[in-house]
Image (spheres, grey):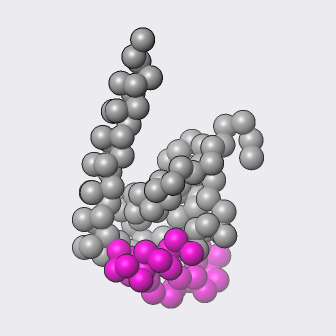
Amino acid sequence: MTNTQTNLLVGTLDVLILKALALQPLHGLGVSRRIEQVTGGTFVVKPGSLFPALHRMEEAGWLAAEWGASENNRKAKFYTLTAAGRRQLHAEVSEWQRIAAAMTLALQAT
């Protein structure tokens, strides 16, 4: 881990995955790359964390998946947000915004 990378806080992985998939379907490596991109390299999600989370979220009904060809023409499983996944994303974003605002207040307190 570099100085600019941070360990994921409990509960952050789900919202990051949902947000990464909000724009378009992606395969697992694409999800990982998107998270690293949108967080400026702060969060790097390793396969050992990512794939169990994707499977869990698929079982919860937040994601749908189908097999397709990746950009290098390899077989890959592409994930898409379901309606339930969009609702979950909205709920989690609201919660994280509330937490971030509370932390900002706490850190500014003297």
Q: Position of residue 27 (x, y in %)?
A: 53, 74
Classify residue 10 as left or right of residue 48: left
Magenta range is 52-79
Locate residue 62: give its quadrant: bottom left
**Does the image show residue 102?**
yes
Using the image, determine if residue 22 lies above or below residue 109: below
Which one is nearer the viewer's eye here, 16 or 95?
Answer: 95
Q: Which residue shows up at 57% across the image and 42% down it?
A: 40
What residue do we see at 53% from left, 64% from top? 31
Q: Residue at x 28, y 48 (%)?
A: 94
Q: Residue furthest front?
A: 110
Horizontal relation, residue 85 to residue 108: left or right: left
How many marks are shown on the rendered structure? 0
* Residue 21 within the segment the image draws in magenta: no
Outermost residue on the top side: it is 110
Give above or below for 106 relative to 58: above
